Amino acid sequence: MSKFRILCIEDNPDTQRMLTFILARAGYDVITADDGPQGIQKARAWRPALVLVDMMMPKMSGADTIRELRKIESIRDIPILVLSAYKEQALIDEALEAGADDYLIKTVLPNDLTDIIDRCLEIGSAVLTKNVSGIRKLVDNPVEDRDDEDEAEE
């Protein structure tokens, strides 16, 4: 597996370390930024394959960071996933309207997070659903329930 570079824009040092550990263990090259302006600077310099961004950060909100990232021609089409502790619908809507490809709650399990990232990198951002019900369905439905749900749909 080639090493994809992931940029984590997260102001909490403990969360940064945890994400770096999880993603590095999954084979990704991880770059971190403490806030939106630093994240935008690193995205321009490093051109990551995917960006994880927190919604509530100092200096610039996650939504504003996403808007700015989407303006940069060389990286505008890369997947951007919000990873936030907040699950209020207004914040989810704001992130998706800003250009996020999906919104994940920080209680996501490490294996689910890496599965979601793998899928994003495998299928590319053009195929992402641009809504919370798309890829995030993996997180909301345990593996055992997925087979039952698939049979019910048939």
Image (cartoon, rainbow, N blue to C red):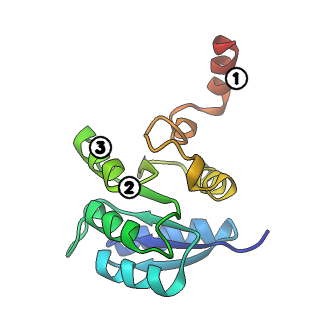
Marks 2 and 1 close (CB-CB < 8 Å): no
**Within the image, what quadrant is residue 67 found in?**
bottom left
- Residue designated by label 1: 147
Query: For this rendering, which residue is in front, 28 or 153?
Result: 153
Residue 8 at what x, y percent from top left?
Answer: 46, 71
Residue 109 at what x, y percent from top left?
Answer: 54, 49
- Residue designated by label 2: 99
Work out whether mark 2 precedes mark 1 in sequence or the reverse, and give the earlier one: 2
**Vertical comparison of 94 with 132: above or below:** below
Amino acid carrying label 1: it is Asp
Marks 2 and 3 close (CB-CB < 8 Å): no
Residue 84 at what x, y percent from top left?
Answer: 35, 54
Q: Nearer the viewer, mark 2 or mark 3?
A: 2
Q: Nearer the viewer, mark 1 or mark 3?
A: 3
Give the mark count. Answer: 3
Q: Secondary structure at mark 1?
A: helix
**Spatial CA span between label 1 and label 3:** 29 Å
Residue 59 at what x, y percent from top left?
Answer: 20, 76
